[in-house]
Amino acid sequence: MKEFDYIIIGGGCAGLSLAYELEIHEKLINKKLAIIEPREKYEKDKTWSFWKVAPHNFGDCVKKSWDNFSVNVPGKTNYLKCLNYPYQSIDSGLFYEKINNKLNKNPNISFFRDIKEISSKDSFIFNSVPSFKKNHLNLWQHFCGVEVESQKSFFDEGIFNLMDFDCEQRESVHFFYTLPYSNNKALIETTWLSRMNDNSQKDYDNQIKNYVESKLNLKKYKITYKEEGAIPLFYPYYEDKKNKINIGTAGGMTRLSTGYTFLNIQEHSKYIRENIENISEAKKYKIAKKYQYLDEVFLRVLDKHPEKMSDIFFKMFKSSPKTIIKFLSNKSNFFEDLSIILKMPKLTFIRALFY
Ligand SMILES: Cc1cc2nc3c(=O)[nH]c(=O)nc-3n(C[C@H](O)[C@H](O)[C@H](O)COP(=O)(O)OP(=O)(O)OC[C@H]3O[C@@H](n4cnc5c(N)ncnc54)[C@H](O)[C@@H]3O)c2cc1C
């Protein structure tokens, strides 16, 4: 059976980002890498968006970048600027193509469908397949997005809408998200933060249809692409082993209050590449403890008081855009954290410490 220095389980966002980072920094010249990925072919299946607070390798896969955004609750809209940290959307189709073109040129890198095809006993393993323990109390961010194309110019492509809470909440937390790629194309997403135990929340197609036709008042359009997903707002089960590191969602790279994962995956890949020669001894890379703690309290409030969340999010975005973006992207300092915390309803959050 074939043997490898490194095995990456799961050739999705984290697995491919890591392989690419190792390859472009020439860490695979004398090393053999196996990537285990069951999918038959790569095609666009996700749109990864984030505020660009750190450099990444995929500037040429950015579909669109914005310097302005809005957040709204019924009757109120807040317009914000993000010139220092533009919001970027990456097309996963371009990302897969770019990385696979590069990796395919290196004969030291091989793809397999199943780990059983190779021997893994002497390899260092990077695993991106999460294990979830069933728990009906876990919260998820679940959503469905469609790309729509209108016949005529309709969208303002200079500004995206991060959260529109002016919609049915169904005793949960629900908002729409609109990314206008051009004046006649946009990604429109319906997003729920919930325990995912209410199937009525999953009538995504109807929700989007009503939103597009009745709220946005767009009547003539076609749907050109659809994506659906659920991001765990809890950490997957993690097994500590000397020859294994979990990466991506499986490795705790999701910011639990927001679901943002993409840029954390890129920073984790960079950290692994910098420490690859001594990887089994390197300290485990984690999202800073303060964010884990603050997000846990935040999610307790969300779970207990879903009806308060639209106002809480709205108030959060009353901070300076630079501060809130840094906070949501794990880059804030103590004073910036404090200014966000002070915007929160104090009694509700203090009570949440004792739930
Ligand atoms: C539709 C969608 C949109 C998202 N949008 C954003 C966003 O805008 N911004 C953001 O920051 N985050 C976003 N996320 C969250 C996160 O960035 C993504 O989920 C990201 O793809 C996580 O990377 P990953 O490598 O951990 O998982 P994946 O990209 O899902 O990769 C895991 C891979 O493992 C493979 N696999 C499965 N089972 C096995 C097995 N048994 N053996 C080997 N391989 C296996 C899968 O085929 C897959 O390719 C989104 C998530 C989804 C689902």
Image (spheres, rainbow, N blue to C red):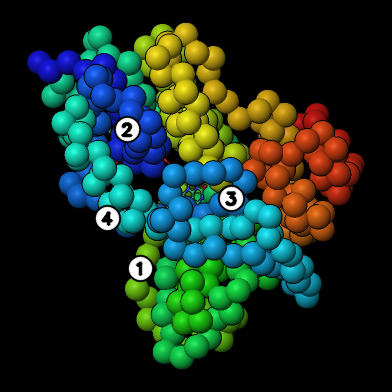
Q: Which residue is mark 4?
A: 43
Q: Amino acid at mark 3?
A: Lys
- Label 1 C-beta lies within 8 Å of the nearest ligand 1 atom: no
Which of disc 2 and disc 3 is earlier in sequence?
A: 2
Marks 3, 2: nearer the viewer: 2
Inspect the image, locate mark 2, and give the three-letter code of the amino acid beneath it. Answer: Glu
Mark 1 highlights which residue? Answer: 225
Q: Secondary structure at mark 2?
A: helix
Q: Position of residue 148 (x, y in %)?
A: 42, 76
Indicate which label's residue lies in the foreground, 3 or 4.
3
Relative to the observer, which residue lies in front, 300 or 31?
31
Residue drawn 50% across and 88% down?
A: 153
Give left or right: position of 270 versus 6. right
Q: Badge 1: few (under 14), some or many (20 or more) residues near its Cα, within 10 Å?
A: few
Mark positioned earlier in the residue sequence (3 or 4): 4
Q: Position of residue 174 (x, y in %)?
A: 61, 60
Q: Which residue is mark 3?
A: 52
Image spot of residue 26 (x, y percent):
33, 28
